[in-house]
Structures are given as C-alpha cells and as structure tokens.
Image (spheres, helix red, strand yellow):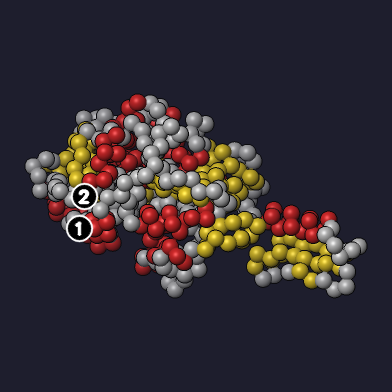
Amino acid sequence: HLVIPSRTVAYQFQSAPGRVLWSRESRFESWGPNQHLTQFIGNLRRILMKAIVYTEYGPPDVLQLKEVGKPTPRDNEVLIRVHAASINSWDWDLLRGEFLNRLIFRGLLRPKLKILGCDVAGRVDAVGGNVTQFQPGDEVFGDLCGCGWGGFAEYVCARENALTLKPASMTFEEVAAVPQAAAMALQGLRDKGQIQPGQNVLINGAGGGVGTFAVQIAKSFGAEVTGVDSTGKLDMVRSIGADQVIDYTQEDFTKNEQRYDLILDVAAYRSISDYKRALSPKGIYVMVGGSMARILQAVFLGPWISMTGSKKMCILAAEPNKGLTFMKELFEAGKVVPVIDRRYPLGEVAEALRYFGEGYAQGKVVITPKEKSSSPCRAKANPTSGHRGGEGRRRDGLESPSLGDHRRERYSGVSSGVFLAA
C-alpha cells in the first residue's frame, strides 16, 4: 500500500489482510528520486519472491509466475533458498485435480496447496528457534510432501526432519532429482520386495523417475535386472545397467515364459492376475504406482492372493525421505546416478509439466530458479563406470517416441503412488 498525503509516504506489505510483514513512513524533501523510494524497493525485494502459483485445477496453462510473500520459518523449520526442484507425478495429479488428491488435501473445488513442488535442493537461508540440525549456509535436499510442498519458488520453508545434507560431490540439480523417486525405489525393492543378490528382478516402467533409480539400486544389490519401457527409452535403460530390456509396445512380459523373483511395478497397467502369472513360485510383486483402478485392485485383492498362496502381492505405502542416508552412500560410491532428462527455469514450469505429462521424460525433469532457460538435455551415465551424470554427458535434441502409447499409459516416473505423508 502506498499513500502520499502531502509530502509523507507511508508504505507496508501485507501477505494477508491484517498481517503486516514490513512497513515504514517517511517524509519527502523533494518529489524527485530519493533514498526512501530506493529503500522501499530494496525492502520489497527482501520480502517478496517469485513462485509458480495455481488457484484452479486444470492443464499447465493455469500455472502463473507471480511475486508472493517470502515465507517465514516456524520454530522447527528452516528457510531454504531453492537452487533446484524436480517434477513428480504427484505434482501432475495435483495440478489436474485427481479426485483422491482433492480429498487428501481438502481441496474439493479449488487447490489448498497454491505452490506445487515437493522435491527440492538448496541452501539454508534462516532457521527457526528450535532447529538444531542445520544452520544458515548448509546445503540440503529433501521431499516436502509431508510439510506443505512449495518447491516451485525461489524460497520454501521445511521442517528440519524433512531434510538431509547434500553430498558435496553432487550438484543441486542432481540431488533435487532424488528424494521422492529414489525413496520409493529403495523402499519398494529393499523393504517391501526383500531383494537378494542373484535374484531375477523386473522393473516395469524402468525409464521414468522411479524406474531409473530402481534399475541401478537393484544392480547394486547384485540382482539380474530386466527393464520394461517404450522403444525410445530402452537405450537409456541399458546404459544405466539393465541386463535385459523389454519393449512393452512389442512384447507382453506377463505372457512369455520368463518368471521373476521380484517385480517392481512403477506404472501398473495390467490386472494383478497377469503380474501374478509372471512371478516365480515364491516371488514378490510390489506396486509403486499406476492407475487408481489398479491401485484399488492391489489393495483389495493383493492380501487375499498373498494369504492363499506362496506368491506375495503388495502395494508400497512409502515414507517420505526414508532411506536417503543409504542413497547418499550409493551416490558417493558411484553405484547410482540421477538421470536428468531436461532442465527448465522457474518461469517455464508450465512447459516442463506439459512435457512431463506427455510421458516423454527419460528419468527426471528438473526446475531451476534461473531466468535464462538452458537447453533441454539428458544427463546419462553408466553407474558401473563410477562417473556422475551431468556436465560433459549431455545430449541435446532428445528424440521423442511415438505419442500413441504414452497417451494411454504414462511411464513418467512416480505414478499415483501411495505416501505416508507424516
């Protein structure tokens, strides 16, 4: 609010009616440019930030780049200056207003979460009074789905228990690709799937966010890995360590004679009985994501199948950030490499989500606060080589596969998975 009675200027910034974040009253000596207006503009810059905001459900076009109030950390929170964030299927589902998400987040008609983005990496800017684990300047990353989201912005607040220190050997973009997708892959394989060395493991949806981590994690446990995805992603899936690949547009793995000790299903599109048929006698099937119909089928039929036979059919209820310390060890050992397909600046989040929603993404799509757009690129590396993806390993002009199959079944990484957002 700017009020000029006579030669006195009074201004204040309100994040909401009645909540004044900053105010000042000054007297002009002249009507020309002066230090008060300069100070006013400088103070606005300190309390405002850019963010991608949406106030209605719909396609990416409903997203808007706006200047909003910078959040203030509570006693158990830290304020993070965001250096990178990444897109997950949960962002896509919330944007589109999937019915179950409307119920979970209590936004039946309009979204309660105004700023999407749960996977973030950045530097601690300020800490609340009760924070003990971090201090300003610390480089951190984490999944914020349990504490308010807000990653598609220049700043975000997060509880300290949702964050982990960034490995010094990794870039902000690399670790921003990690939290949700890697946690789901690890929990699905290790905790639910009880993966063992020498097992024959199949990853359905191996070319997306969760799938690319799952292939590499399974290899680090000494498993024989088969990756299933569309034609355009198979070369990348091989490059990150898959022993065999299957093009789901050409072959149905549930109908061949191969049996698997563990199936991690990132993009369930077949009935649970089909997956049961593809398991070995004591095999385990773990659904990480898929359509709501397939999730409900796994919830109600999976326990019955598991109780009446030797095969186990289950669905992952993932815990945010669980296992990230273990993942840091794999990263630092060079056994797992985040696969980044494209990078977009903050102002192009709508375009990034549009690309993601088409199902083209190989690995993760990353967002940075930079104004200048970087060329779409994919960081690809063979984890057995010990080199990280990133600079020097980029390839422009990503060739997109056919649209037809992707419109029916999106292999986009974290499909509509189930999270314990605690």
* Residue at the (54%, 60%) spot, across then down: 65
- The mark tally for this picture is 2
Q: Which mark is residue 313?
A: 2
Q: Does the image show residue 413?
A: no
Q: Residues within 10 Å of mark 2 (few under 14, many from 20)?
A: many
Farthest-out residue, left: 257
Residue 105, position in %: x, y?
44, 64
Residue pointed to by mark 1: 301
Residue at 62% x, 52% y is 73
Q: Is label 1 in a helix, a strand or a loop? A: helix
Q: Is residue 268 above or below residue 325?
A: below
Task: Name which of mark 2 and mark 1 comes first in the sequence.
Answer: 1
For the residue pair 230 and 338, the one nearer the viewer reads as 230
Q: Quadrant of residue 378?
A: top left
- Position of 99 relative to 201 (above/below): below
- Residue 88 in the image: x percent, y percent? 40, 52
| C-beta proximity under 8 Å, tags 2 and 1 | yes
- Position of residue 290 relative to residue 110, above or below, is above
Q: Give residue 91's position: percent from left, percent from top.
A: 42, 57
Pick the front one: 408 or 222: 408
Q: Please name the residue shown 42% across and 51% down the image.
A: 87
The image position of residue 283, as x and y in percent, is 17, 42
Report the residue at 15% width, 44% height from top: 279
Q: Quadrant of the N terminus?
A: bottom right
Residue 11, which numbered label? none
- Three-letter code for the amino acid on which mark 2 is drawn: Met
